[in-house]
Image: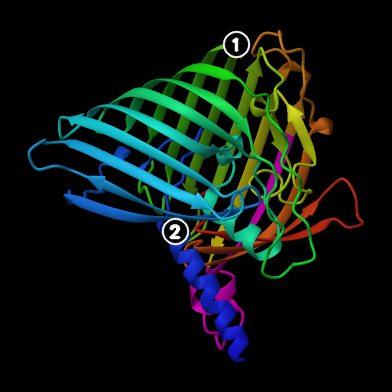
Amino acid sequence: MRKQKQVLTIIITFCLLLAASNAGAQFKVKRLELSSFLSFEEKTFEPFPMVRYNRVEGLFLGAGLTVNPPMLPAVAFTLRGGYGTGNEEWRYEADIEKSFFEMNQLQIGAGYFYSTSSLDDWYIGWIENSLAAVLFSNDYMNYFARKGFEVFINKDFFDNKFRVRLETANYDYESMPRETNWSLFRRDHKFRLNPQVAEGNETSLRLTLSYDGRDNPLFPLSGWLIDGIYERTFNDFETDGLFMTVRRYQTTFGSQRVRAKALLGARTGSIAEQHLMDLGGLGTLPGYEIKEYSNGNRLLLLSLSYQFGGDILSKIPLSFIPIYDAMSLSLFTDSGWLSLVDKDAAIFEGFDNVRVDHMKTDVGLALSVSEEMLVMKFAKRTDRSEDAWHFLLRLMYKF
């Protein structure tokens, strides 16, 4: 019993540190500053931890500090740094950002970085991926390192609901091999190998358009959330990329609600590992194996979830369970399509080949605790009956 409590304490501590950590994302748009519902007291010094776990860095331990000098109004300096105990390497980032206007802000910034990156942060957060890796040896992301600099400008419109971001960056790619196989509950299980990337230098020019029409940025009940990214790259890799995410939140009856999400991705000009996409596992098709379908340059993913809230569970006499009042039930389905077309094909070419019988689909149910702070998913793939069920955990899940 004492050992179980110690294990539980380790897990809870690790989760809390993860929740406070900061990891960069390539295809996710920062949300908190977009919302007019939240306000923050500006602090002169604001430190924060950086903790994550994966098969290429092992346990990554670091910290960051944001400084808002009183003599430089609306200027923020952010420093981040940490060390991977598995690969025995440092990662770091230094940013400076200047903001103008209190409403519909204009932000200009620049940064220098040596970071561990992944295309998979489009589908899954670093927090829940770290939890799956440290507990069950399920690392759903592929990784590479980038070293270089970036310059960006953001402009908000229409009461901060619409954002335009333009950024340019230059960086070198580095491969990252698997460096650890340790996990808490599956110590004999080995992590997947991490694929090598095509090393070289890349300059990127990226335009992001983002609309946040949700009624609440933390626990939305209704509204649209739309991101679109167009990217052009040069030097060793000349590519065009288009990545779109559309989410809809809608209430139905009582505390019940429905959520829908669509992802579309396309890349032309390169079939290097760092420019290709995958399907399978947490974040895409939870009923399938991790990256069961890989190395595509055209992707379509549709997800639908119906949340009953506590309307169904409240009718079942299980209130003796300590967290039962905080639990809710939902049903979900995901359907995805991945294809590899000629790298020189037009950016929308290939999507005309999408057919319903080509889509890979799963269905399942989920039990959530405290507005999806913890989600237990039971997912079943629909293309076979044997070995078709998967159990997955999600932490601080955001649809």
Is the residue marked by circle 2 packed among few (<14), some (14-19), or many (20+) residues within 10 Å?
some
Disc 1, SS: loop
Q: Which mark is residue 324?
A: none
**Residue 294 placement: quadrant:** top right
Viewer-nearest residue: 212 or 179: 179
The correct choice, above or below, for 63 with respect to 100 in the image is below
The correct choice, above or below, for 367 with respect to 109 in the image is below
Q: In the image, what residue type sits under mark 2?
A: Ala
Is the residue marked by circle 1 packed among few (<14), some (14-19), or many (20+) residues within 10 Å?
some
Residue assigned mark 2: 19
Q: Position of residue 167 (x, y in %)?
A: 39, 21
Viewer-nearest residue: 360 or 79: 79
Front disc: 2 or 1: 1
Q: Residue drawn 56% across and 35% down?
A: 145
Q: Which mark is residue 238?
A: 1
In the image, taking residue 123 as reference, residue 364 lies left or right, namely right
Q: Position of residue 286 (x, y in %)?
A: 71, 50
**Residue 324 placement: quadrant:** bottom right
Q: Residue drawn 75% across and 42% down?
A: 291
Estimate the spatial distance between the alpha carbons at disc 2 and disc 1, rounded to whole Å: 36 Å
Viewer-nearest residue: 96 or 20: 96
In the image, taking residue 266 as reference, residue 81 lies left or right, namely left
User: Which residues lie in the magenta part?
Assistant: 310-336
Q: Position of residue 348 (x, y in %)?
A: 65, 14
